[in-house]
Image: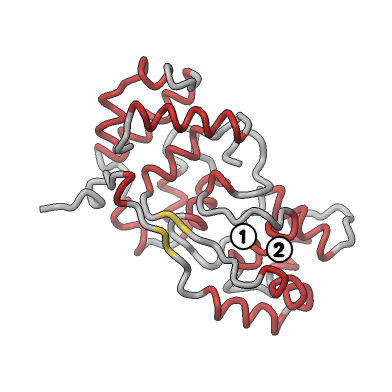
Amino acid sequence: MPTSRENGEAPVEAQVIQVPHYWEEAKIELMKRDRIMKKLIPQFGDLHLVGHSDPFTTLARSLVGQQITPKAADAAWKKLLLACPKCTPSQVLKAGAEQLSACGLSKRKTEYILDLADHFKAKRVHASQWDQMDDEAVIAELVQIRGIGRWTAEMFLIFNLLRPNVLPLDDPGLIQGISVNYFSGEPVSRSDAREVSANWEPWRTVATWYLWRSLDPAAAPAAPDAAPGAPAGTVK
């Protein structure tokens, strides 16, 4: 009998926080290789990336956060959870467009979330297999869902699947972090970012996280909607 996770329907209550198994090794390697990381990483002590295990909830929260302020996104998300307490694909589909719109979601976002739920319910995405799929294969599936572009897919790889080597070049926080820490605030191109990041492999996720922290030391995100530096118009 398939589990709720295999059906893409892990309820909110069943979600667990995960800590990347590679984090300490990555810190040691990055500090050995990179003079900036050697100075930056110790500033944040035992802080680390934490992830969320439920893919549907993570992606739904991402869609809710698009094009609005964090405060507005939080308010809409809380209303959605009142309408759909377990936040499963079936529950969202049952709620329907009218009830989702009443949560403060735009017509387009309502359509996006219903499309997401339909993809999970109909198993047009292979959420139970994503752990075994490579990064680009997961991205290819995710971007087929309305409202999900590459940046959102990369945030999902980082915060849900805890992939160690993601370099989100469309993330302004990453670009700003490289600019401030490596180029004395001068403008940074994607080529510059790739060149700097070559020294981080296979731990580009970890280096990215520390660059985010360097811009916003108080934040320690646990999910994509909390990623600092995210462009307005996607999850923050």
Q: Position of residue 232 (x, y in %)?
A: 66, 35
* Residue 91 located left or right of residue 57: left
Instruction: Name the residue: 36% across, 18% down.
Output: 99
Image location of residue 194, percent across then percent down: 71, 63
Asked if the residue under mark 2 is in contact with the one under mark 1, i.e. CB atoms within 8 Å, the reply is yes
Q: Nearer the viewer, mark 1 or mark 2?
A: 1
Q: How busy is the neighbourhood of tag 2: few (under 14 within 10 Å), some, or many (20 plus)?
A: few
**Relative to residue 224, is residue 68 depicted above or below?**
above
Most foreground residue, 120 or 70: 70
Q: Is residue 233 positioned above or below 203 on the image?
A: above
x and y percentages locating residue 228 in the rendered image? 65, 49
Give the left or right position of residue 172, taking residue 110 as reference. right
Q: Earlier in the sequence, mark 1 or mark 2?
A: 1
Image height check: is 70 above or below 100?
Answer: below
Amino acid, disc 1: Leu
In the rendered image, which residue does mark 1 sit on? 167
Instruction: Give SS at disc 1.
Output: loop
Measure the C-alpha gap from mark 1 to mark 2. Answer: 8 Å
- Residue visible at 37% across and 35% down? 116
Q: Secondary structure at mark 2?
A: helix
Residue 72, quarter of the rendered image: top right
The relative height of residue 183 versus residue 126 in the rendered view (above or below) is below
Q: Which residue occupies 35% across, 64% down? A: 132
Label placed on residue 194: 2
In this orientation, which residue lies closer to the viewer: 209 or 183? Answer: 209
Q: Residue at x 86, y 62 (%)?
A: 183
For the C terminus, the quadrant is top right
**Amino acid type indicated by mark 2:** Arg
187 vs 153, left or right, is: right
Q: Horizontal and vertical percent for residue 158?
A: 52, 58
Q: Is residue 190 left or right of residue 117?
A: right
